[in-house]
Image: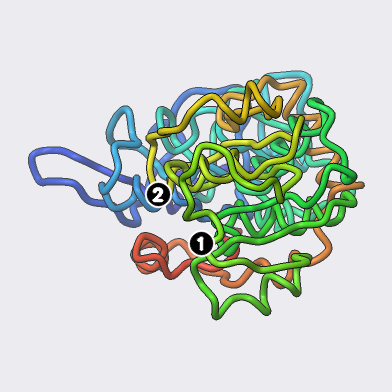
Amino acid sequence: MAIPAQFTAFRIENDEAGYRSGLVQLGLDALNPGEVVIRAQWSSVNYKDALAGTGKGRILRRFPLVGGIDVAGTVVASTDPAFREGDAVLATGCGLGESRDGGYSQYVRLAASAVIAQPPGLTPREAMVLGTAGFTAALALLRLQDNRQTPGLGPLAVTGASGGVGALAVDIFSRAGYTVHAISGKPAQADFLRGIGAAEVLPREALADTSPLQTARFGGGLDNAGGPMLASLLAQTVPYGSVVSAGLAASPALEMTVMPFILRGVSLLGVSSANAPRALREAVWERLADAWKPRHLDSICTREVGLAELPDVFDTLLAGGGLGRTVVRIG
């Protein structure tokens, strides 16, 4: 397939004219070098994308840079024998939209090490409804299970449940057989959360107590908030339950005692989706396309936009108005 001399991309710049982002026309030579060229079809919007696109977070490591940490599409050229023209592929993290040109472009050039074959069972659009958010939620579940988390230990709490990672975690965890208690500061979204698999919806106040050890009510969970909420969740986790930390929407700080760890054997686990090893990424995506594929992707995807609409989406997300997932139509 011939690659056009110019194509549309959403690029972020920071120079003497100031910090800005928007649509530009680029040629392939303007993109980072790489072995695989993809005709992008879909991308998604993550909190990190909004911070990068607006300059409200120090995300980008160089300028100018095409934004977008996720992309799904079709290979149009490859010098790596692992990929051939016409292959359906995806990429998340791996420096996209941070240190190298990302997925908000009609054509994307990537290192072969960043590219994953799209597993059977997912369309490109479904892969981007999942994107980094779904990958993070599934990676969290894998970490929990590797640490012997079972449904018998009790319900899994998910904080920030109405956001992208949280909503997908609710669906994925319930699909995997766990009872899920969604914790959200948006009471108007209670029906939405029950509809995607939450057995109970609890307000943020459920994790307001900062006592070092509290009545054990959760088998474990996934925290997207950090700060006092994470400390409280750990203090309310049953013996030998596990909690995964995946975000810092409330605070990057964690002030607590070691009591949950030494008196109950609670585990605090971390996930880093951006730099997960290739074998791990492939294993997680295989599960997302099969046994852990969310049952409510159509409900969780609450918005579909084109590249030109990204600034508005960024502002809404950073203002706390995001719900579920937004996919970006590029093809």
Q: Position of residue 239 (x, y in %)?
A: 75, 33
Q: Secondary structure at mark 2?
A: loop
Which residue of the protein is positioned furthest toward the left in this rendering? 16
Towards the viewer: 32 or 145: 145
Q: Position of residue 80 (x, y in %)?
A: 71, 19
Pointer 1 residue: 204
> Is the Cβ of the residue at disc 2 closer than 8 Å to that at disc 1?
no
Q: Is residue 212 left or right of residue 299?
A: left
Q: Position of residue 163 (x, y in %)?
A: 55, 60
Residue 62 visible within the image: yes
In the rendered view, would you say 46 is above or below 252? below
* Picture quadrant of residue 35: top right
- Residue under the image location 33 percent in, 34 percent down: 60
- Residue under the image location 74 percent in, 30 percent down: 143
User: Callout 1: few (<14), some (14-19), or many (20+) C-alpha neighbours within 10 Å?
Assistant: some
Q: Secondary structure at mark 1?
A: helix
Towards the viewer: 319 or 160: 160
Residue 325 visible within the image: no
Q: Position of residue 10 (x, y in %)?
A: 39, 52
Three-letter amino acid code at the position of disc 2: Ala
Res. 136 mark: none
User: Callout 2: few (<14), some (14-19), or many (20+) C-alpha neighbours within 10 Å?
Assistant: some
- Residue under the image location 60 percent in, 38 percent down: 92
Q: Is residue 131 left or right of residue 287?
A: left
Three-letter amino acid code at the position of disc 1: Arg
Give the mark, 2 or 1, whose residue is nearer the N terminus: 1
Q: CA distance from mark 2 to mark 1?
A: 11 Å
Pointer 2 residue: 250
